[in-house]
Every structure is written in C-alpha cells, then in structure tokens.
Amino acid sequence: MELFHRLINNLFPSRCILCRQTVHRHAVSGTIVNESAAYEPMVSERVEICSDCFRVLPFNDTCCISCALPLPADTNNVLCGHCISKPPRFDYCYSLFRYENEIIHLVRQLKFGEKISYARSLGELLCCRLQAEIERTNEMPDCLLPVPLHNSRLRQRGYNQSIEIARVLASRLAIPVDYDMVRRQRHTEAQSGLNAKQRHKNISNAFTISGQVKYKHVLIIDDVVTTGATVNELARLLKRNKVERVGVLSVARAPIKN
C-alpha cells in the first residue's frame, strides 16, 4: 500500500494549497516543533502544504492555558485576563494556529471559497495536535461535535466546514462524530463584524439538544474561535445536559477585539 501511494504521488504530485508549488512528501513529513514546547506527531502525507510554507505557519505556541487566546511571546502557562475574571464554560481549548496571515486565507477559502478539500490538510494537522494532547492527558473524548450550522446557511454554503474537519479526525483517531446531538434552532446573524458583546447576545440560546445526551466527554470542533461566544454557548448547553467534560479544538484562535 505504501508503494502504491508513493507511485500515485510521483505520477500526480500535489500542489501546495498556499503557494501552488509541488509538494515533496519527504520534505513535509517530519516532526512539528513549536518554539516554546515541542510535540512530535508525524505530519501525514495527506497534508498538502510544502515545507517552505509549513515552516512559516503561525502556530499558536504561546496562549492562555484555558481558552487558547494568543499571548505575548514572553508569557507561558498563564490564564488570560478574561478567563481570570470570567472562566469559560468549556474545560479546555486547543487551537493550533493564530488566526493571521496564511491561516486567514485557508479558513476563508474553506468556508466561503468552496475549497472543501482544504479540510483534509487542516484536519490532518489538527489530528497531530489532538493526538499529542490525548497522549499527554490520557483523556479520549467520547465524541466529536462539529459546531452546527442553521439549515438555511447550510443550504446556502452546501456543507459545514466543521463537519468536514471532524470527519478527518474521526477517521484517523476512531472517535465518533455526533451530527444530530445538537441543532441550531434559530438563524443568527453572521458573527463576523460583531463585537464581543454583540456576539454573545447573537448566539444566546441559538442551540438546542436533540434527544438524550449519552456522552460524558464531548469535544467541540470549530474552524476559528474568536471571542469564544459560540463554543461557550455550546458548552453551557452540554453541561446543562449532564456532560461532565467539554473541550474545544479549533484550527485557529483570534485575538480578542474590544
């Protein structure tokens, strides 16, 4: 099987989703090393990012230990001011990248540019991070919960980017995805363009539980966490329905804007 994949890759080389140059698989495969703390999962051959682009990706190396908010480079293992004053409803949050530069491009293309194939590369990179955290904490989520879209927005877009990312994680780590546990019961204004207070008001009571929740540990999957309003609302709902532990895993975390 490995020989077959090598043959296919040689015959039909992939193009980097950032610079469009040919991806040399041996150059991309290797360890991911963060500046502040090294973790060493293997980057899968399915990641269509060349080695040059990979090296400059904005990994979220220094962040709040609770909500993954990016912090100054000289800060480590601390809570941000927001988590100190008002702890989030979720128990932990892992965000692989800072929401800037190339990551903004990738996420926007995935969500609005119909580049659904980007979910595979982003999902594979997230898989590396999640696998490292599972090994570190010895905690395996019972299920993955992609942030639900309202039916009207799903029809408009044609797919849910969080579901596409979650499918990659489920396939690689054998964690089930629950597509029906939570639904978006009302259409909300797009969160982009709203400030933190408006986001919280906009998303309040937007979700509802469908049936009985059978999980004790749920991991919410999202593309970008900005203020945390959406994932916080989901965590509040899950905790109210007797979920003991709620985590968040996102491609990127944006700095909080007032």
Image (tube, rainbow, N blue to C red):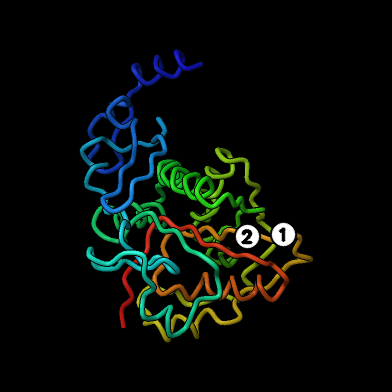
Dot 2 and dot 1 residues touching (CB under 8 Å): yes
Image location (x, y in percent) of residue 80: 36, 75
Q: Name the outermost residue toward the right.
A: 212
| 102 sits to left or right of 227 | left
Can residue 116 be seen here? no
Nearest the viewer among 4 and 141 is: 141
| 141 sits to left or right of 227 | right
Mark 1 residue element: loop
Image location (x, y in percent) of residue 184: 61, 70
**Residue at x 26%, y 60% (from the top left corner):** 100
The amino acid at mark 2 is: Val
The amino acid at mark 1 is: Tyr
Mark 2 residue element: strand
Q: Is residue 84 above or below residue 69?
A: below
- To which residue does mark 2 refer? 218
Can residue 159 be seen here? yes
- To which residue does mark 1 refer? 215
| 183 sits to left or right of 136 | right
Dividing the picture into quadrants, the one containing residue 238 is bottom right
